[in-house]
């Protein structure tokens, strides 16, 4: 049976065929497949397995049973999953070529980051996060950069006007602390976290504006206000900086 999968907003034509998923290949697919095979060889089971490509421009991955989407009380389990993922990428070459987006921080890369751990890209079973999917934006980066990107969506770091009702009123600072404790983020990185979030907002605004100029899905997201959402999130971060920081010292 063939089922069209929804959840993400970027990739068109993601379909489930039995216990596999077909997704359009991208420039990063050769690297992503090598990464997924590396994770498998390291015994990490929180990611799809590579089945192959179909010769028609699609990659074939294993279907991970469960549901994607935001779950409120998952931030510590998610932190442990992200930690296990980062640790399992160790030993994988940290070369810049062949990834989408290129390097995005000034610090030397430490691991391969997923770089897009949104609610749509985490699979839950029985309320617990069991796998990351959609590695299209994975690339060499620092642990802290991937953590900041994850917290953008899961603390979340956002203006409440842009959030689902079920995400409003969450204590973002406390959730950042829970994440950092469960991941094992050292004090030095906790102190840098909010500054890096600010830098990331600035850069992702510019990257998205550049991608939007090419049209396609990025252009539609920009037209639907993705740039303004980043600006509002950055402003929200400025207003709440002190109270957030108090959770991270
Ligand atoms: N390997 C997989 N196992 C289970 N579900 C998947 C898998 N890949 C994609 N999906 C489902 O399809 C949705 C969209 O796929 P995704 O790969 O995230 O594409 P997009 O680039 O559009 O975000 C996901 O949110 C998830 O619900
Ligand atoms: Mg996705």
Image (cartoon, helix red, strand yellow):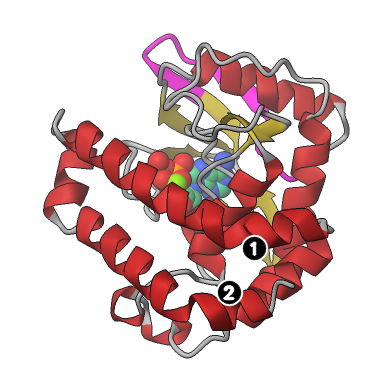
Q: How many marks?
A: 2
Q: Is residue 1 visible?
A: no
Between 41 and 158, the one nearer to me in the picture = 158
Instruction: Give me the residue at 32% from left, 49% from top.
Output: 9
Q: Quadrant of residue 20?
A: top right
Please give the label number shown on residue 71.
Answer: 2
Q: Position of residue 126 (x, y in %)?
A: 71, 72
Cβ atoms under marks 2 and 1 closer than 8 Å: yes
Element under disc 1 = strand
Which dot, 2 or 1, sits closer to the camera?
2
Between 229 and 68, the one nearer to me in the picture = 229
Q: Position of residue 132 (x, y in %)?
A: 63, 47
Instruction: Give the residue pinned by disc 1.
Output: 124
Between 142 and 73, the one nearer to me in the picture = 142
Q: Residues within 10 Å of mark 1 (few under 14, many from 20)?
A: many
Q: Is residue 59 above or below residue 11?
A: above
Q: Position of residue 121 (x, y in %)?
A: 52, 51
Instruction: Give me the residue at 15% from left, 28% from top.
Output: 214
The answer to which of marks 2 and 1 sits earlier in the sequence is 2
177 left or right of 58 in image? right
Residue 183 magenta? no
223 left or right of 176 in image? left
Between 186 and 209, the one nearer to me in the picture = 186
Element under disc 2 = loop
Judged by its main secondary structure, the magenta piece is: loop
Quadrant location, the N terminus: top left
Tell me where the magenta segment starts and ends, as one range: 45-59
Residue 57 magenta? yes
């Amino acid at each position: 049976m063939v089922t069209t999968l929804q959840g993400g907003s970027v990739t068109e034509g993601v379909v489930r065929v039995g216990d596999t998923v077909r997704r359009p290949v991208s420039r990063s697919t050769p690297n992503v497949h090598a990464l997924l095979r590396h994770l498998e060889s390291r015994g990490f089971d929180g990611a799809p397995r590579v089945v192959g490509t179909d010769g028609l421009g699609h990659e074939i991955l294993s279907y991970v049973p469960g549901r994607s989407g935001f779950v409120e009380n998952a931030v510590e389990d998610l932190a442990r999953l992200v930690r296990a993922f980062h640790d399992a990428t160790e030993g994988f070459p940290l070369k810049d070529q062949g990834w989408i987006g290129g390097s995005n921080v000034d610090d030397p890369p430490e691991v391969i980051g997923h770089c897009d751990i949104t609610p749509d890209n985490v699979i839950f079973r029985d309320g617990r996060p069991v796998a990351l999917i959609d590695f299209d934006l994975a690339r060499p980066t620092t642990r802290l950069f991937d953590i900041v990107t994850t917290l953008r969506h899961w603390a979340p770091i956002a203006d409440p006007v842009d959030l689902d009702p079920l995400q409003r009123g969450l204590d973002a600072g406390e959730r950042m602390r829970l994440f950092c404790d469960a991941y094992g983020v050292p004090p030095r990185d906790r102190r840098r976290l909010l500054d890096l979030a600010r830098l990331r907002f600035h850069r992702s605004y510019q990257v998205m504006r550049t991608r939007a100029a090419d049209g396609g899905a990025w252009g539609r997201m920009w037209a639907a206000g993705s740039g303004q959402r980043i600006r509002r999130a950055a402003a929200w971060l400025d207003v709440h900086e002190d109270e957030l920081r108090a959770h991270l010292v």
